[in-house]
Amino acid sequence: MAGFLNLFGDDPGDRFRRGIAAHERGKLDVAEQEYNRAIFLNPFVAQFHSNLGDLLHQLGRLDEAKDSLEEALRIEPKNAAINNNYAVIMEELGDLHAAEKYYKRAIFLDPKYTHARVNLADVLARRREYAKAEAEYRYILAENPEHTHTRQNLAVTLKNLGRYDEATIELTALIRQLPADPYLRMLLGMVYQLQGKLDIARDEYQASIRLDPNNPATHNNFGSLLEDLDEKQGAEHEYRIALSLDPNYVLGRENLARLFFEMGDPDRSELEWKQLLLIQPDNVKAHRHLGKILLAEERLTEARELIKKAKELGIRDDELLEMAEKLKKLADQESHEDSDD
């Protein structure tokens, strides 16, 4: 067999090692060539395909990475690391069901595989299976109490479950450990805001902004808190800062447009909703609020065009359906009046 593999004057193992060295030095094009050469010389080694898959993943070529890792799994289906890495690709491709399946397979093959268990917990949280995610996070923390990523995501899961006191305990413990982490302070501000502890929430958001003034999400969340405190001008200011940091930040644009609508300023609201549709053409809230503005101002032709566009985009929304019915009745009424004349 060894003689057969050296027919081309190359050793696949040497090529693979060269690929690893190039990969570690960041020479990704060279690494890809070496991995492919190793596979050409000996296509029956799972690790060759696995490393190529990891490289392709790093390059953002997810479909090719998926193919490489599937070949690695065909050769060595009981390799826990390859199962985990394949699950990562499937998660990034949006197939959360397959991701869960292969994370669980990796854990079955290696019950102490912490990284796979963390990934499983995270994908369960993404699927909003919060109770299952909590169980996994707590299992990990029982074995690794200093695992900060897990404790942070446990806190987020507890927030999503509405168990705010427990989330506060976890976040406060993390902040003692990582006092300069702006994201943790933002999360704690969110939990306090949900609890109605608005003054304490303000302190946490402001602390987060001092630590990192360039996070649009923090300014957006602080804006929503200021709305809760009926400080509308301050809220507008924070939403605008968020959008200055990221003009395509959908949630910030939604909040600013909605704020103008609720303040009785339909012109500025309309401008923001239309800007949002340039960023996200199928945004349901934008269509809904624009429809309300157009109907209120009796701009019926524009309203009909908006509803038509929403239908073409596949948007399904009860309020838009009601608007469509209202527009139809108005059209029928106009037609009836014209026939009477």
Image (spheres, rainbow, N blue to C red):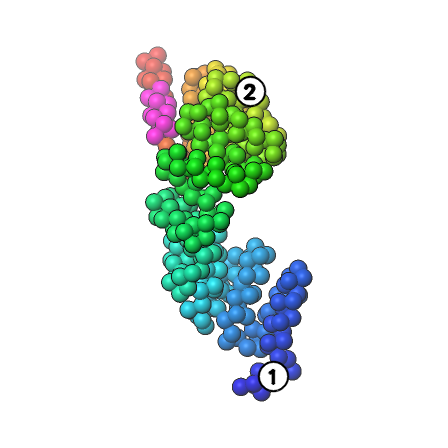
Towards the viewer: 309 or 144: 144
Query: In the image, is 121 to the left or to the right of 57?
Result: left
Residue at image point 52% right, 66% down: 50
Residue drawn at 61 percent across, 31 percent down: 210
Amino acid type, callout 1: Asn
* Image coordinates for residue 44, horizontal then vertical, percent: 50, 76
Drawn side of residue 273 relative to residue 134, left or right: right
Where disc 1 sits, the SS reads loop
Q: Residue drawn 51% across and 58% down?
A: 63
Q: Is residue 253 visible?
A: no
Q: Residue furthest top?
A: 341
Image quadrant assignment for residue 288: top left
Give the magenta part as a residue range.
318-330
Secondary element type, mark 2? helix
For label 2, count other residues whose C-alpha is less than 10 Å away and answer few (under 14), some (14-19) or many (20+): some
Q: Is residue 3 shown in magenta?
A: no
Q: Is residue 241 above or below residue 89?
A: above
Residue 27, image x, y percentages: 67, 62
Name which of mark 2 and mark 1 comes first in the sequence: 1
Badge 1 density bin: few <14, some 14–19, many ≥20, Cα 10 Å: few
Alpha carbon separation for disc pair 2 and 1: 72 Å
Q: How many marks?
A: 2
Given the image, on which type of amino acid does mark 2 rest? Gly
Mark carried by residue 58 = none
Report the residue marked by disc 1. Answer: 6
| Rendered residue at 50%/46% (across/down) | 148
Q: Main secondary structure of the magenta part?
A: helix
The image position of residue 341, as x and y in percent, is 35, 12
Q: Mark number for residue 234?
A: 2
